Image: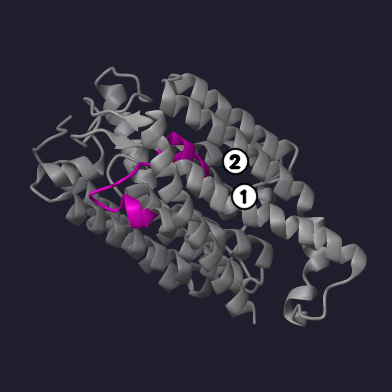
């Protein structure tokens, strides 16, 4: 029954995102909410935005509905038709409501900031400030912590930096049709596996919504894209993945995995992390603002080598899936297995680095 519920959550978010994307595309065209071609843009014709509204709504609506139902059922009792496998988690869902409200409020704030930026450029530093504010709120108000075993203040600082880094990684990744949504779907599926293995149904439920929302939007965003998510979508995807990667438990006790299970999020998100950090370093080296967009990403390198947009996107999908597979195995292997997973991840990133060093469009 848990599996059916998870499938239903993915399906609900998929349908909401799919229908919402169609509606937002029509609205964007009527309002003139259009992304025009530019120097840091690959598309050659005006393309409607507002796809991020559909993604965010597909996450928010079921989340709010679930919180309301959990609160009502905790008082009035679970209905007879609700399976016991789900009703036993009502109290836990109610207990998680304060944290959920802080996280969803952060999503809304980043979504609004992204919408404003999609309409008229806010500038990178204002967006970064908003990300830091949201990350601090989730850490200090919501109590979300990464690496709690090392104590404070390192845990809080690491948590804030991680949230800002992953939020920006997916914002940066939205540089070619279908890339950010597809990579988000792959990472959500891998995290869902880890959360389900730990019995973290609160986290798994959100990952189901994130997976469905990403796939529903991807139907219209896969190259050639009919609509873009914009910053209003990429900031939300990155923030949610950052939050859920912290909330997911990777270590299940015993001698296996005690030292290296904490690296699961890093291995899982190795491709977007490498892309973000390498692009920032290139921009700094060239004395350019590291937050200003350009065509220096891994995807642009692949296009410069003659790949089509679809082939470039699929290449990055496969690289992400490979690191995601290793990340899923990491908590369950011995030390030798962990070394192999790390070696595979380094190998994949090294291949990316070799491809980036080739001449072509976007040469640093």
Query: Which region shows up in magenta?
Result: 218-236
Callout 1 touching callout 2 (CB < 8 Å):
yes
Q: Tell me the residue that label 1 is attached to.
A: 60
Q: Nearer the viewer, residue 46 or 94?
A: 46
Circle nearer the N terminus (1, 2): 1
Pinpoint residue 345: horizontal percent, then vertical percent: 34, 59
Residue 10 horizontal side relative to residue 183, left or right: right
Residue 88 horizontal side relative to residue 139, left or right: right
CA separation in Å, label 1 and label 2: 9 Å
User: Circle 1 sits in a helix, a strand or a loop, which is it?
Assistant: helix
Q: Nearer the viewer, residue 18 or 184?
A: 18
Residue at 71%, 60% (x, y): give it: 66
Residue 343 in sight: no
Q: Residue furthest right?
A: 75
Q: Nearer the viewer, residue 145 or 240?
A: 240
Q: Residue 168 occupies which quadrant of the picture? A: top left
Q: Any magenta on residue 301? A: no
Q: Residue 110 occupies which quadrant of the picture? A: top right
Q: Tell me the residue that label 2 is attached to.
A: 107
Pinpoint residue 249: horizontal percent, then vertical percent: 62, 62
Residue at 9%, 46% (x, y): give it: 305
Residue 40 in sight: yes
Residue 340 horizontal side relative to residue 146, left or right: left
The 10 Å Cα crowd at callout 2, few under 14, some 14 to 19, many 20 or more, is many
């Amino acid at each position: 029954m848990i599996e059916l519920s998870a499938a239903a959550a993915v399906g609900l978010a998929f349908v909401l995102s799919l229908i919402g994307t169609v509606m937002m595309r029509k609205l964007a065209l009527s309002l003139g909410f259009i992304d025009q071609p530019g120097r840091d843009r690959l598309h050659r014709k005006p393309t409607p935005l507002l796809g991020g509204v559909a993604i965010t709504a597909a996450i928010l609506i079921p989340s709010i509905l679930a919180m309301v139902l959990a609160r009502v059922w905790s008082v009035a009792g679970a209905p007879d038709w609700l399976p016991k496998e789900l009703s036993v988690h009502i109290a836990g869902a109610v207990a998680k409501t304060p944290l959920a409200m802080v996280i969803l409020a952060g999503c809304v704030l980043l979504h609004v900031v992204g919408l404003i930026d999609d309409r008229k450029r806010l500038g990178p530093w204002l967006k970064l400030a908003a990300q830091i504010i949201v990350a601090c709120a989730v850490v200090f108000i919501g109590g979300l912590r990464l690496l709690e075993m090392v104590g404070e203040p390192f845990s809080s600082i690491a948590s804030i930096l991680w949230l800002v880094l992953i939020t920006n990684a997916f914002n940066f990744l939205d540089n070619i049709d279908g890339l950010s949504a597809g990579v988000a779907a792959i990472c959500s599926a891998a995290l869902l596996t880890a959360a389900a293995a730990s019995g973290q149904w609160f986290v798994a439920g959100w990952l189901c919504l994130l997976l469905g929302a990403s796939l529903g939007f991807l139907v219209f965003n896969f190259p050639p894209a009919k609509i873009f998510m914009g910053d209003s979508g990429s900031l939300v995807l990155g923030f949610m993945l950052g939050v859920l990667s912290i909330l997911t438990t990777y270590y299940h006790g015993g001698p296996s995995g005690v030292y290296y299970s904490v690296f699961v999020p890093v291995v899982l998100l190795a491709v977007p992390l490498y892309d973000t950090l390498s692009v920032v370093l290139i921009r700094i080296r060239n004395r350019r603002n590291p937050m200003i967009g350009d065509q220096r990403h891994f995807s642009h390198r692949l296009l410069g080598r003659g790949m089509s947009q679809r082939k470039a996107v699929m290449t990055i999908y496969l690289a992400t899936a490979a690191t995601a597979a290793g990340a899923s195995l990491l908590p369950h292997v011995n030390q030798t297995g962990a070394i192999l997973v790390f070696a595979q991840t380094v190998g994949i990133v090294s291949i990316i680095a070799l491809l980036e060093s080739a001449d072509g469009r976007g040469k640093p």
